Amino acid sequence: MGRKQPRRLAPEQAPRLDVRIDDLDHEGRGVGRFDGKVVFVDGALPGERIRARCTARAKRFDEAVVEAVLEPSPERVEPFCPVFGRCGGCTLQHLAPEAQLRQRERRVHEQLARAANELPGQWLAPLTGPVQGYRTRARVTVRYIRRQGVLLGFRERAGRHVVDTDACAILDPRLQRLIPRLRSLIASLDRPERVSALEMATGDGDTVVAFQYSGPLGDADRARLVRLQDEAGVAIEIADGPSAGPVDPDRPADAFYELPDERLTLRFAAGDFIQTNAAVNRSLVARAMELLAPAPGQTVLDLYCGIGNFSLPAAQRGAAVTGIEGDARLVERAAGNARANGLAGRVDFRQADLSAAPLADWLQRLNPASVLLDPPRAGAPEAVSALVARPPARIVYVSCDPATLARDLGRLTGEGGYRLRAAGIADMFPHTGHVEAIAALEAG
């Protein structure tokens, strides 16, 4: 049985609370207490006293939104986005970037202190980059409403409606300036209601926009898409359905990003998983290689390898790398990237469900000197079980969720006997509640 949802309160029924805020939760909400009960307050910051309107009640906690800041934090700043507070993309624009960074570091430190059996031997300096214009990949929601026209933007916070916007300051400028043109284009289509979302991505090659389009694409609408593609200098695709593929078969997208320090180019397609912050990703790859220390003659196992973001740099240093990924399309892309970079002889990419794959058998057969894993938000409990049973000398764990990272590191340092050599964060997602972290472990 799932957790019971809090009871929503109508605005006219909602009590007002005077709350002192002590902390932030993982979603960026302020955390305080009122009459001994925990209250999560959207828009509040640690150290503030605020007046809040209660929006929902549960047995153990309440939810609320700020109505007035009675004693502001010195770290409170004016949000730069006009739809902040309604849009669900950013939750922390009202907190100074330096303070956001400290909050993320503290969150990782506290999670590791609670769940792992030891603190790292070294806290690594945070990896940072731009705090605006950094996002090179985004999914934009589209709704056509006959009396309103085309709504294009991001989902609202705690809701299902679209927050219509002409700009998003955290998007790479190449993506941001496309938004008004894409809205006008969709409004001009014969069947605008068939467009439900756009997958947008950019890098060092083409900027790609993939339309989620239901049904066949008519000739007139295809001509409109081709015209925008030519005028805007982007590559446009239909993501799925009967018309899937480039709108102009003679001009398929060539999307890629470069890792200059690694002398590598990685190609990707719209909808592929790539890191959203190119500058921080380059720093993260460099740090992962420093911690992993791959060398000629060594074998490396890269779990959740994607398109080869870590596999290929390890192979570039001479290691023999096996990369395992659950998405067959990403495996194909990774293999193509290995060939294009002259590394096919050093890398073997395999498709497997890592929640059920026989990792213990692979570990025994490959006997890797080191393992790198970069799992989704749920972590890697099955992989950790295999690593405990057949421990390599070194593990580097990249994570987008401090809670599951701490859980998995706790097992590795407890059951597996590993020492937590180093840990730190990469500020991959400024102004959001998300945290990217990296940890290095060595066999005891």
Image: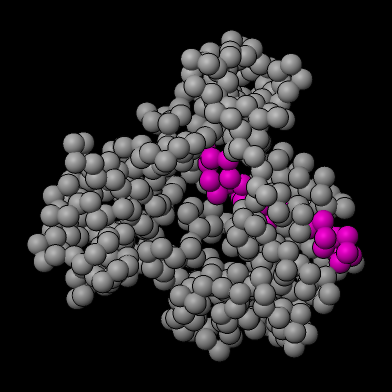
At 76% from the left edge and 52% from the top edge, which residue is drawn? Answer: 406
Q: Which residues are magenta?
A: 409-438
Considering every residue shown, the one lying at the far front of the view is 1
Q: Is residue 296 magenta?
A: no
Relative image position of residue 34 (x, y in whole percent): 70, 18
Vertical side of 194 occupied by 312: above or below: below
- In this rendering, the answer to whether 135 lies above or below 169 is below
Is residue 411 highlighted in magenta? yes
Indicate left or right for 232 with 164 as reference.
Answer: left
Residue 36 location (% of width, % of height): 77, 20
Out of 107 and 97, give the one closest to the viewer.
Answer: 107
Vertical arrangement, residue 338 with respect to residue 184, above or below = below
Q: How far across and how far down the image is residue 119, in percent?
A: 84, 49
The part of the image, by quadrant, that contains residue 384 is: bottom right
Comparing 214 with 114, the one in front is 214
**Quadrant of residue 240 within the rendered picture:** bottom left
